[in-house]
Amino acid sequence: MSRIRSVTSSVPGIHRRTVLAATAAVSVSAGAAYALRPTDSAAAAPAAPASDARPPQAPPTGSAAPAAAPLAPYTRGTTLAAVAAPRAGSGYRRMGSAPGWGRVVRGELAVPRSGRADRRTALAAFVQLTDLHLIDSQHPLRLEYLRAASEISWRPQEALTVQGAVSLVERVNALRAAPVTGAPLDCAVTTGDNTDNNARTELDWYLTVLSGGRITPNSGDPRHYEGVQNSGVPLYWQPGSASRDAYTRRGFPRIDGFLAAAIREVRSPGLTLPWYSTVGNHDAMPLGCYAHGDSRLAEYAVGGRKLMELTPAEAVRLQRSISQDRDPRGTVLRDLLDSRRRAMRAVTPDERRAPFTPREYVRAHLDPAYRGAGPVGHGYTRANLEAGTQYYTFPIAEKVLGVSLDTTDPGGHYNGSIGTAQLTWLDRTLRTHRDLHVVVFSHHTGTSMSNTRPDPARPRERRHQGAELVALLGRHPNVVAWVNGHIHRNDITPHRGSAGSFWEISTASHVEFPQLARIVELVDNADGTLSLHTTLIESAAPHRTDFGDLSQTGLAALYRELSANARPDGARLSGGPGDRNTELLLKRR
């Protein structure tokens, strides 16, 4: 049988997840000091109650507390029920619904035993959101012109990332329970690349989408769009033009009013779950790959000139300088922009497009305007500000601890690594909480943590690659999963360590088709094993679109359809059946 609801969830006026968010510091216990200030053993102050927390109310005298409702799996709106898929044909393909993806049992780390579904006890259930890439599509520093070198360097759906993210929030809010156990969802966790250009506009949009409120996904001229999609440059889809561009030749539609609709005000209900934030390379550095510090690049970001096209040869050279890690500080890009000033187009300057530093990223999370369902700071605290860190622990459930890491390398480049101080803190934290199951969250995967360039703020500190992090996690039998993103692909990998085993769960992005997020449920099978059930979800937008529907929901549906037609490898990004909806077995330690 699935577990009975906890006492707190059956008391009127309070929910178990609200209690966890409101008492985060207490639940983490002594580990809070390690989580927030790695070099200081002083305990952190208790977190403030979440905004929706209310004191428990006792039932009337002489009456029994209301009985807890029975738990029932909730699969509606998940990819178990149905998935969006392009219809058969060539050229631009409209979207429809396809049968859902079944659940695959994976027993590489433990043998699945019969009858476990009748014995299991739910321990935790959370939602992972990753690689939202909220894009200020008119930002002067964007690299759209790399489209001349590679078709996948620019996306025709980029003006609709806010509408798509709001629709994903709506889907998460509509999930009434976990799809396997029927347990209440404990929280949501982002795993980085929440923004795209490291721009303050995008950071505001991201925090408002998740916290709730109104967003105008526009910058520069408040009246008009000023980006590549009305430039007349045939590299890009020009939705309101009758001219033939690279996309209309493939069947992309003409949609009058598309750009005006894309920059209209959007309303987000905000997540109703407590949510926690993890940093990615696009959140940490301009364009996700350049170290902070070049004042000329910062001037281009807020200025009134925008480069919109390059020759294929120029684009190839710039792309290689990035992918081969030859330009960590953006010197090649800066020199290129300086040499092409006469070819740039005039746009409206906007100080809101300025890059933000890691310190400003943490401070923004602590802003009361973005509290939403809480907790305050969404994992980050004042202690993070003082220590200059972006890693912490948080309670997922009564017996399950979350650890959010910072795997970005401030020295530059999009691949990551981890510094010695953070690795030491992680080792100590896992030993301190050996009595809890631990889920680790980061942006980078083990294979993408290959960049060991020194951190400019800590030039003598050694940087560690993914293999070293995998080895450390394998020395702690309480680690059950490492959840991450970055590669924009569903990929689930078993890891056997010296003392324990765990699953690495990588989830596809929400900016590329198939635009997914993931529910993860941890259960005890009462037979010496644990199971991690993973279930993918799409946004709430309908699969079928109408080009005449330019409402917020219609644009979210079009966001998905455009992404499905933007690149041909959606099937690859979906992963195999064993990377999607799964049951992942582990030995209980």
Image: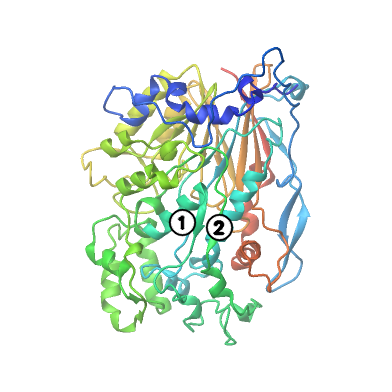
**Quarter of the image where the N terminus is located:** top right
Q: Amino acid at mark 2?
A: Arg
Residue 132, position in %: x, y?
A: 51, 53
Q: Amino acid at mark 1?
A: Trp
**Quarter of the image where the C terminus is located:** top right
How many neighbours does mark 1 have within 10 angstroms: few (below 14), some (14-19), or many (20 or more)?
many
Nearer the N terminus, badge 2 or badge 1? 1
Tag 2 and tag 1, C-beta contact below 8 Å: no
Q: Secondary structure at mark 1?
A: helix
Q: Residue at x 60, y 19 (%)?
A: 588
- Asked which colour scheme the image uses, the reply is rainbow
The answer to which quarter of the image holds residue 7 is top right
Callout in the foreground (2, 1):
2
Spatial CA span between label 2 and label 1: 11 Å
The answer to which quarter of the image holds residue 472 is top left
The answer to which quarter of the image holds residue 463 is top left
User: Where is mark 2, residue-wise?
Assistant: 267
Farthest bottom residue?
Answer: 243
Q: Is 423 displayed left or right of 148 in the figure?
A: left
Q: Secondary structure at mark 2?
A: strand
User: Where is mark 1, residue-wise?
Assistant: 205
Q: Residue at x 39, y 56 (%)?
A: 288
